[in-house]
Amino acid sequence: MKEKLTREEVLHVADLARIDVTEEEIEKYQVELKQLLNDIEKVNDVEGYDDDMMVAPWDDNTTLREDVPGEMLDPKKVVENAPKHTGNYIAVPVVITENESEGA
């Protein structure tokens, strides 16, 4: 079993992820990505592994109600009941800012 991925394999993964990698990163990822793939492969060695068990640890016996269209709410009344609104739009607090997404 080889200990690292080829340069081409790392570049292919980087292309799929749409990221640029430096020469140093390519060398680093050749080893790290191979270690990750080896760890993932260990799942196949688990005794009693079953695809059904991976979905949920319980039986799928959910009973769903029939989807029946109901009466629509009056948009004006909905907006009037919102704490903050502008025209026909309900104002909500910002949850994600550009600065937070850059650090992720």
Image (cartoon, helix red, strand yellow):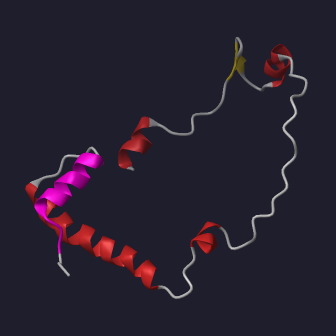
Q: Report whether 54 appears left or right of 102.
A: right
Q: Which residue is drawn at 19% across and 46% down?
A: 20
The magenta stretch spans residue 13 = yes
Residue 15 image position (x, y, % from top left): 23, 47
The quadrant the N terminus occupies is bottom left
Q: Magenta part of the protein: which range?
A: 4-16
Q: Main secondary structure of the magenta part?
A: helix
> Which quarter of the figure has residue 73?
top right
Q: Which residue is drawn at 71% across and 19% down?
A: 85
Q: Residue at x 47, y 37 (%)?
A: 97
Residue 28 image position (x, y, % from top left): 17, 66
> Which quarter of the figure has residue 82?
top right
- The one nearer the camera, 9 or 91, is 9
**Residue most extreme to the right:** 71
- From this view, report whether residue 69 is shown above or below residue 18: above
Q: Report whether 56 appears left or right of 67.
A: left
- From this view, report whether residue 96 is shown above or below residue 80: below
Residue 19 image position (x, y, % from top left): 24, 46
The magenta stretch spans residue 20 = no
**Residue most extreme to the bottom:** 47
Q: Report whether 29 appears left or right of 36.
A: left
Q: Report whether 49 appears left or right of 29.
A: right
> Which quarter of the figure has residue 49?
bottom right
